[in-house]
Amino acid sequence: MFYKKTLSALCVGATLFAIHGSASADTFNLRIGSGFPSAPSPYVYEVEKFFVPEVIKQVKEKTGHTITFTEAYGGSVAKPNETLAAVETGLLDIGIWCVCFELSRVPLNNFPYWVPFGPAKAEVAIRAARKVYDEFPQLTDHLEKKHSQKMLGLAGFDNYHIGSTFEWEKLTDLKGRKVGAAGPNLPWLQGSGAVGVSTTLPEAYNALKSGIFEGFLMFPSAYNGFKFYEPAPNYKKIDLGAVAVMMMTVNTRSLNKLPKDVQKIVVDVGREYELRVAKSLDVSNSQGLEKLKAAGAKITEITPAARKDWATGIKDWPNKVAKDMDKTGLPASNVLKAYIKHLKAEGWVPPVEYAVQ
């Protein structure tokens, strides 16, 4: 009888402890980072100044739990081309990275680059890209299945133009000139007469200064933030377009360790981040142009005729890149068609028609 009463008391106590334990407040820490620095990069700045504090605030107010972040930007844990892998292995719980550095792992996610002279506004680019992501689950399913991470939000780069060490007006002035660009947007230079040179943001300043190349395909926020106007003060507005090629992802194991209510907050704030960063990119674009002018850069604009000639010279490339990727079994042509359709629905008018077969 004594044994039964003792056992019963222990069971009741264990039940009460379990109930109390499940309701108790816990503290969770997430490691978040990017290969890009915060200050000149809106897609990282909005993580540092909005996503992190907003998640902390909502978790405290809505769940009673506490969440903290160990922040590692500017490549202190993983470089730009290492961040996807860092999230996959758990070195980072959350990472902000560009699909442009992961052509072999996420080739289809580079579809915004397949539309040169795309939308000038990042808001348009990100809204259209989000519709494509919603329409084609393959774009995110493989992240979870192959790389152990879930997309929290899209981001991107603002409207691309070209800075150079020399002045130019006609496309013939670009013939044979070496112009730096990164990865999948290197083919944009086809039809311009320029010779494309593959580079990265950290390399570009010294490359321009030393003459490895004489121009750089880059958006205003970074052109100003990284002071490329010092070696290359001529900045030509071309409207090659904004692209939604950045994403914030979370390691699925890290996410699943969190209570359900905390998981929901992380996911919901990730979508809020996506909306905020789109606006921030467009503001950064305008401010970047103003700051470049104030810093002494000479800002001019390409003539409509030269822009049309450039676009005509590259009009067959989008279909080619999509068809080549179709051969690997990915629905590249359908993704490209959908993206162009959604861009046009947003009011984008292409300089030439990109016929996708």
Image (tube, rainbow, N blue to C red):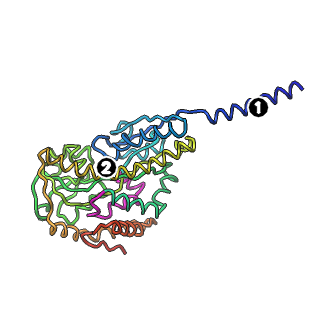
Viewer-proximal residue among 52 and 147: 52
Q: Which residue is the site of mark 2?
A: 280
Q: Is residue 338 visible?
A: yes
Say which quarter of the image contains residue 209.
top left
For label 1, count other residues whose C-alpha is less than 10 Å away and answer few (under 14), some (14-19) or many (20+): few
Rendered position, 250 above or below 186: above
Viewer-proximal residue among 110 and 223: 223
Is residue 17 rendered to the left or right of residue 150?
right
Q: Residue at x 24, y 48 (%)?
A: 221
For the residues labelled 1 and 2, say whether their Cβ atoms are less than 8 Å apart. Answer: no
Rendered position, 246 above or below 45: below
- From mark 1 to mark 2, how far is it between C-alphas? 55 Å
For label 2, count other residues whose C-alpha is less than 10 Å away and answer few (under 14), some (14-19) or many (20+): some
Q: Residue at x 40, y 58 (%)?
A: 109
Q: Which residue is the site of mark 1?
A: 12
The three-letter amino acid code for the residue at tag 1 is: Val
330 drawn magenta: no
**Region of the chain picked out in magenta, as a range:** 99-121
Q: Is residue 324 visible?
A: no
Q: Residue furthest front?
A: 61
Q: Residue furthest top?
A: 2
110 drawn magenta: yes
Is residue 320 rendered to the left or right of residue 223?
right
Where is residue 346 shown, x and y percent of the image? 34, 65
Total marks drawn? 2
The three-letter amino acid code for the residue at tag 2 is: Ser
